[in-house]
Amino acid sequence: MVLSRLCLSIGSLALLALPAVAGGNVTITWKDATFAPGKLPADLPESARAAINTWEQWAKEHEYRMTVDPAARLVLVTPAERSIHEKQAEILARTCKWFDEILPVPDRTPVVKAAEASSSKPTPEKPPDVIPEDPESPPAGTPPPKPVKTEPAKKATSWGAASLQPDSQTGVMLVIRDEKEFATALDELGKAHPYLKDWLASARKNTGFVLEQPLCGAYIEIASGQEEWSPEHELLNRVAQMLLLSRFGQLPNWLVQGVAWEAEMGFDASIWCFPYRDEFVYTVEHAAWPIEVKNTFNDRAKDPLKMEEFAMWKRGTYEHDAAQTSWGVVRFLATQHKAKFAQILEEFRQTWDVQNRKPKPDGTWERMKDYQLPASAQLKILTMHTSADFLKKATAWMGTQDPGPSKS
Amino acid sequence: MARSPKVIILAVLGMLLFPSLVSAQSDGFQRKRAEARVELIKSQLSLAEWCSLKELFLERDQVYTRILTLEPDNLDARKGLRYGRNPDGSWKDPPAREAKNRNPKGLEELPARRAKAIGRYRDTMLELLASESTDPKLRREVYDEILRFDPDDARIHDVAAETKSGDQWVLADTVAAKARRAEIKTLVQSSKSDVPAAEEAPPTPEEAALAAWNTAIGTSSMRVFSTGDEPEAQSILTTCLAAESLLNALFGFQATLPAGYTIFVLAHEGEKDGFIDKLPSLTTAERDFIRGLQSSGVNEDKHVALFDPEPRRRLDNSVRHTIGHLLHSACGVTAQCGWVWEGAGLYLTRELCGTRLTWFISKAPATEDKEQQTLRSVLLNSDTNWMNEALKLLDSEAAPKLDQVMRRDPNVMTMQDMLAAYALCAYLIESRPADAAKLFQRAGENLASPTAATDPVPAVQEILGLTIPDLEDRVRRWLKERR
């Protein structure tokens, strides 16, 4: 009898702990209030509604919940049964705050294009206002005008080659239970965005991704074979990448990874998330990067850092030396040139946007997949905003400092 | 023979005096304007005080700000806007404040107050402008200055020939042209639909001998003989007869086509030479000249022959020639009067056919001038927006002077002249059709009087009430507003 009561009590507890999707609805939390998808608050921005709408059905089918950050910049999609989601929401908010402090919204005024600056050509004048030949309608018999060659709307022609209005989308970060559900999330993306077809094949081989268009990221919470990992770091590293993508578009890989690692260092002075690294990471390494970077550069005064050592590090790969150098250079920028850091990245964004245009015979253009700014163009931006001997100073700084974590 | 010293001294004095007289005139204008501005500032300060009294604080601040455009260091205005002084004496920006108009009833009284506050200055300046020979730019500058203080000043808009369209002041010509363009389109349609049905019109034995005509149709006014098909001949006949109705309706002319007016269409390759060889009463040189043309007047220019291999060009050619006949009939204008012949001819042909493929100017094709050649190839492109090209030209430093354009015949007109003539005629036909008719007629009359023909200025002044610079300014602005 006592046993049966106990069983009953346990049964009741189990019922209480059931996923918040009981009844088939997805729970959406925003500013400490909970909503059903059909009853979102009126002041929730349209971009957030669109993001929720995109993933609502998938979340419902797989029993996930959604948490929108207070500024509605990101939607966190997590397994509904996990109690960790509050902690995750806190990490999300903390990462956003850290990111805005390190990389606030820059001045978006178009800068002189790198190509133009190098040839000292004046900025082209705004085309004059054209008056119509026939303000109302042309006379009968007038030959129809030939189609005007216009620049097409900026649209991605292949994955990762998008060019969107900065800070215009609400990003979605999916924290996925396992490989099987990860595959269904990729299927969902493929259905909604056919242009991702080629990319999907490679994405299935990995355990996470971050995309610009649509602005979303995902990772498997506990993938098979994972040993040394931290759920907090997994989340904040990818959220930092997504925030970076949203604000500055397609940056060179060294900047993306460098900033994400700096976010991790800012969290608890350690790095746990190593995308595309398939070797074992010793426990001591997580907090060892500052001293390792110092040791690498402390005797490089006569052989200062070269752009080739980190600037062209390819995305989708892991190169240990380039990785550590990338983080070191990012930390140098974030601490020694903090006031200009966001503006430097903005110039990277604008230059990439202008230079990554492959002309087509019909006068339009398309993006080149996997395009990266040449190292020389990157150096030009870095030196223009800092000093002509940027690399020398970065070498000296990295070799003599023993930087602690930046505050978060 | 040596000139007497007295004459030389007077001549030198004259040379010295002339520029100083011009300068004195300009100084006088500026001095009087400065005096009037002093009074204007006083009246505007009073207006600002009134606004303050009526709690129209936003308006008050705007009045003060406008005063600073006349006198940047005006103490009352600076004080009113709460400027302070920096230790070095420069002005210190006032703390930000949100000024609001708090009295809706006061706002209703504002227009009358504003008009009163600018009235005296406006009247003084208008008198001054009337008494001095000022260029359009200075006049416009004065108008704009007054309109800054009262955007709805009726007198200024009146003298500037402006009217309100929606919430914008534009040239009255702009509004008139918009309505007129719709009328022109309707007139073109009705002119075409009112053309009487064509009947068979057998050629005379002499005409029949000229070519193997496949189609011979006509009305009581004109005939079309063609070696091509009947639909094309019908289209040529209809459009040319519509041109007659259109011109008469547009300008109130009584233009008629020459008696027995005939258009010969040589639609196929190899027919041109045989036709030209058989034309009576021509010298060998004249025959060779015609062989080099795509269309030509024949039978002492009474009739027209079309040789172009493209049907749409043949239609365009036929209409241009027909309009030429009609302009001559109505006004006495011939090809010698280049600006009307080309300008009105091209404009009206486009209204009737949608094309501008027949040009009479002869200078450009042979010229080595690169600018001429470039503009020629631009204008030959059927996609080119001539109105926009004209605006670019008239806005540039290379803009041709309209009085020069109006003096030239097609043999000396440049491509720029032709484009300017096109824009001028478009302005006249769309905005001032009655004046256009008078000017065209005067141009025709002037052809008979060589002295008058060289000087279009009196006609422009008398009929349009504008000096040539004013007309240039007007056409330029009209083009900008033609949307």
Image: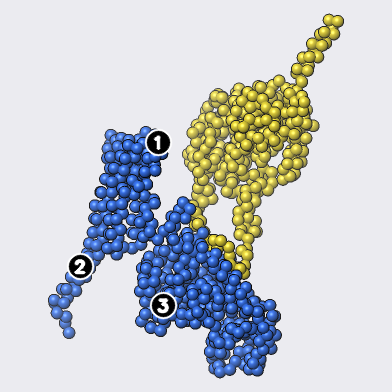
Residue at position x 61%, y 63% from top?
A: A145
Of all chains, the one bearing label 2 is B
Residue identifier under label 2? B17
The three-letter amino acid code for the residue at tag 2 is Leu
Chain for colour yellow: A
Instruction: For label 1, count other residues whose C-alpha is less than 10 Å away and answer few (under 14), some (14-19) or many (20+).
Output: few
SS at badge 1: loop
- Single out the mark in the foreground, 2 or 1: 1
Residue identifier under label 1? B102
Relative vertical location of residue B243 with respect to residue B286 in this rendering, above or below: above
SS at badge 3: helix
The three-letter amino acid code for the residue at tag 1 is Arg
Q: Pinpoint residue A372: horizontal percent, then vertical percent.
A: 62, 44
The three-letter amino acid code for the residue at tag 3 is Arg
Q: CA distance from mark 1 to mark 3?
A: 60 Å
Residue identifier under label 3? B442
Relative vertical location of residue A140 with respect to residue A93 in this rendering, above or below: below
B267 or B102, nearer to the observer:
B102
SS at badge 2: helix
Name which of mark 3 and mark 2 comes first in the sequence.
2
Residue at position x 70%, y 85% from top?
A: B214
- Single out the mark in the foreground, 1 or 3: 1
Say left or right for A1 vs A318: right
